[in-house]
Image (cartoon, rainbow, N blue to C red):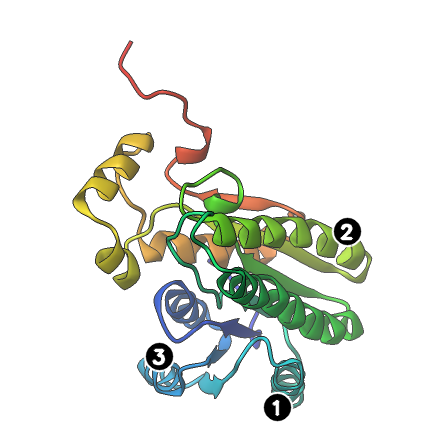
Amino acid sequence: MAQAAGRVAIVTGGGSGIGAEICRRFAQDGLSVVVADRDAANAESVAASIGAGARARTLDVVDEAAVDALVKETAEAFGRLDVMVTSAGIGIQKSMLETTEAEFRRILDINVTGMFLCGRAAARVMVGQGSGRIINIASVAGMRGVPGRVAYSASKGGVIAMTKVMAVELGEHGITVNAIAPGPIETALTERMHTDATRAAYNAASPLGRYGTLAELAAAAAFLASEEASYVTGQTLAVDGGMGVAGPLFKV
């Protein structure tokens, strides 16, 4: 996908999974990428795999001062910040009755407050330059009632709502804000967590009958970051194989 030369992106949660794949895709498209992750070793590994044009930074997204410092450092080093992808997030599989207050608060803190802090810091730079793209990684769990995901679903529903408000407030400054809502995606995490029964249920619920790939998800981020998406804002793009729009799947 064509990208303007010299563009710069920060990807939080860039040290693994979805964030890492987005970093690699952005680099292929010619962007300079800051791989930001709590795990310094993972961030360094991803940046090294990309090579020139990538730098690794350790970041805790709920540390307001650290977020502001990273964005400032990036803008000063490159002279601009074009894309912020907020991919850092956590989740648990636990019933509402068993979820503790501490677990609930921790998930909302990272998944909602962390995204807010990163988006706000990036927007302050983007407002000054009159352009920018903010892409928040949500989830189809924020759009549906998924058993065992009360905290995670609440957090991702908050991300989707926050994305809309950010888009409305920042549009006049030439900044677009969108979310991506992944469905079941083949990652190291789903490989460990999803049982055969879980996989069968997800596959049965999807018109495409399979899990998505990291490359397919990164392609959606590449589109939203590109000039081709210049008139798209406030949207949540579900990358879920049609699972969110399907009714009962049976042959007529």
Whole-angstrom CA distance, mark 2 to mark 3, is 34 Å
Q: Is residue 192 left or right of residue 145?
A: left
Q: Residue at x 40, y 46 (%)?
A: 148
Q: Residue at x 56, y 50 (%)?
A: 154
| Picture coordinates of residue 170, whole percent (x, y) | 77, 59
Q: In the rendered structure, which amino acid carries the disc numbered 3? A: Val
Can you tell which mark lies on residue 65? none
Residue 58 appearing in the image: yes
Can you tell which mark lies on residue 46? 3
| Label 1 element class | helix
Q: Residue at x 38, y 70 (%)?
A: 20
Q: Residues within 10 Å of mark 3 (few under 14, many from 20)?
A: many
Using the rendered view, name the quadrant where residue 227 is placed. bottom right
| Label 3 element class | helix
Residue 233 appearing in the image: no
Q: Which residue is mark 2?
A: 168
Comes first in the chain, label 2 or label 1: 1
Whole-angstrom CA distance, mark 1 to mark 3, is 20 Å
Can you tell which mark lies on residue 77? 1
| Picture coordinates of residue 69, whole percent (x, y) | 65, 87
Q: Is residue 120 left or right of residue 157?
A: right
Which residue reaches farthest right?
Answer: 172
